[in-house]
Image (spheres, rainbow, N blue to C red):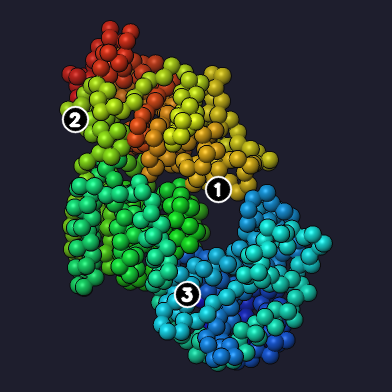
Amino acid sequence: MRLYSGMSTDFIRDTTRNQVAEKLKAAFLAYYRHNPSPGEVGSWRNSLRAVKDVLEIGGLNDHGILLEYQLPLSSKRLDCMVVGRNDDNADNAIILELKQWESCEKSDADNLVRSWVGGGKRDLLHPSVQVGQYAQYLADTHTAFHEGPAPVALSACSYLHNYMPLPDDPILASKFKSVLCDYPLFDANGADALADHLVSRLRGAHGREVLDRIETSRLRPSRKLMDHVAGTIASHSPWILLDEQLVVYERIRAAVRTGLRGRKKQVVLVRGGPGTGKSVLAINLMAEFLREGRNAQYATGSRAFTETLRHIVGRRSAATFKYFNSYGRALQDEVDVLLCDEAHRIRATSSNRFTPKAERSSKQQIHEITDAASVSVFFVDDRQAVKPDEVGSADHILQHAAEIGATVSEHQLEVQFRCAGSDGFINWIDNTLGIRRTANVIWDGADGFDFRIIDSPEQLDGLIRSRTEQGFTARLAAGFCWPWSQPGTDGTLIDDVVVGDFRRPWNARPEAKRLAPGIPPAPLWATDPGGVDQVGCVYTIQGFELDYVGILWGLDLAYDLDGRTWVAHKEHSSDSTVKRAKERFMELLKNTYRVLLSRGMKGCYIHFLDKDTERFVRTRIEASLTPGEQDLPIAAESGGPGYEGG
């Protein structure tokens, strides 16, 4: 999608006559169904006039122009692309990132500078870093730039047409030397230099042919990107498949081969509880499909998990690791195979409270996903939905598959790879929380899994820290029972989680832009060493495996010993989204603590704020593991009144 496409002579004429911004505005309205902001229209007028001047200086009058060109399966749009041929008659395209900045300040973060944008100073990507990412993404995903004997050569630069750099200007700092060399930056004095730069790559003109080639090409990841992602996954030793995982892996590969040969949609459903290896299976399938040359993508509803995968595999992987809401404007069958991990987090629609009213759609999110892919593979655990708008249950997926006439195959993962490989611990969690009846009423400490109830939050925190010092992965998490503040003006976090004298901050909020040194952004909390200094919530820890997890069990979910039942306390919850769930509030709270309890591979430690809840849980533990508590009745063995377990 682009808002403007034409020849440079047309662009120069439209800009000279003050028409180009109006044409962009009309195209924006036609596509997005609402008007662009006045600020965006103003930026078009100012920046594109500067581009017009550069084209006139360089005599570029037989070249293609694309404006506001949307990156495939992304909401990001390129400001401008100029295309044509070089002296050797080879097709070329140059991305121009346009900025109205007038000054900037240094940032202590890599790849960032601070500038005045949107009414305040903000940390922003250096323009050369930003445009370099755009170029890499487009080269990785668009066939015009990587297929055929002579793909279009793609380069990029930025033009800050209002910027007058000072001596020792932060935007030209030595740490940006390499990226400035690869993706040059031109300032307010650089119109002639930018014109020369364009001419050196586009002197051969013939822009119409190159423009048509780009506009008629399609989305498909490059071989280099496929090899990069597949190679990184293959080299990550923990991601190995065993036994039934490998059986399901081969069955899914067979389903994909069948699905890509036929005309009917294929829907594959893989059920599995916590620790059964759903994500490991999905990631390995992703690597294999990329090695086979399939256009495969991996999507989740978790920002933390997706961003961590991108961090591990490399930023280029943003082209293949997506979100469930990335497919609203995808073409039919644009993706060969779409692997939907944690599919229980699929929403009813992709619209949310941040979606502008004019952009909201009532189309089901699962419909967007299955429209976009020839084969959709869903990995689901119905008991891990923790928000009221998470509707991606197995039944929801199967009902939709029936509605679209898809061929369905179903698989079940049973073998436990988390909690020291203990099926018993997961079953004990479900039984103790009253989620489902299992044979594991009492936890007997089997399988070497280190489960303990800890007397104080200070001891719990110390135990988790000692595990990290021993080289294990370990984090402290909690029920959402305390407010979650924005960082202070200096980027430090507020100590929101307070239990007596114990005080700790939550992990950084997902939208936090500027954090003090040593504080990881929310998506990297589970993997960054600095994360041990904060308490994680379910939305940050879900999807991750740790060696050890410590849990502060708050007052939102408590056990009533007299009534022999679990009780949900909205007054002790700070999760406004879940509190709005009304009749599902209890269910979502139980799912939340189930997720928290099942994160550890080697051990789980808990401190209870409610002593009756602690006493009840101790009745569910082998007597030899809980000295001093044997006088309490084992209420749930008889499945007393109001208790759902048994």
- Please give the name of the residue rendered at 62% of the width and 70% of the height, measured from the top-left corner: 182
- Can the viewer see residue 35? no
What amino acid type should be assigned to the residue bearing mark 3?
Met
Q: Which quadrant is the C terminus positioned in?
A: top left
Quarter of the view holding residue 317: bottom left
Residue 433 point in image, percent of width and height: 29, 28
Q: Residue at x 19, y 30 (%)?
A: 437
Amino acid at dot 2? Thr
Identify which residue, 605 or 358, lies in the foreground: 605
Q: Is residue 467 left or right of residue 156?
A: left
Task: Pick whichever of labels 1 and 3 is earlier in the sequence.
Answer: 3
Task: Compare marks 3 and 2 and give the one earlier in the sequence.
Answer: 3
The answer to whether residue 257 is seen in the rendering is yes
Whole-Å distance between the Cαs marked 3 and 2?
Answer: 53 Å
Amino acid carrying mark 1 in the image: Glu
Q: Earlier in the sequence, mark 1 or mark 2?
A: 2
Q: Nearer the viewer, residue 473 or 3?
A: 473
Q: Residue at x 63, y 77 (%)?
A: 21
Please name the residue that numbered disc 3 is placed on.
1
What residue sits right under mark 2 in the picture? 438
Q: Where is mark 1, residue-wise?
A: 511
Q: Secondary structure at mark 2?
A: loop
Residue 90 to residue 533: above or below: below
Residue 321, given in percent of the width and then of the height, sits at 41, 58
Residue 381, given in percent of the width and then of the height, sits at 28, 44
- The secondary element bearing badge 1 is classed as loop
Rendered view: 618 above or below 224:
above
> Most extreme residue toward the right, as rendered?
167
Image quadrant in which you'd find residue 290: bottom left
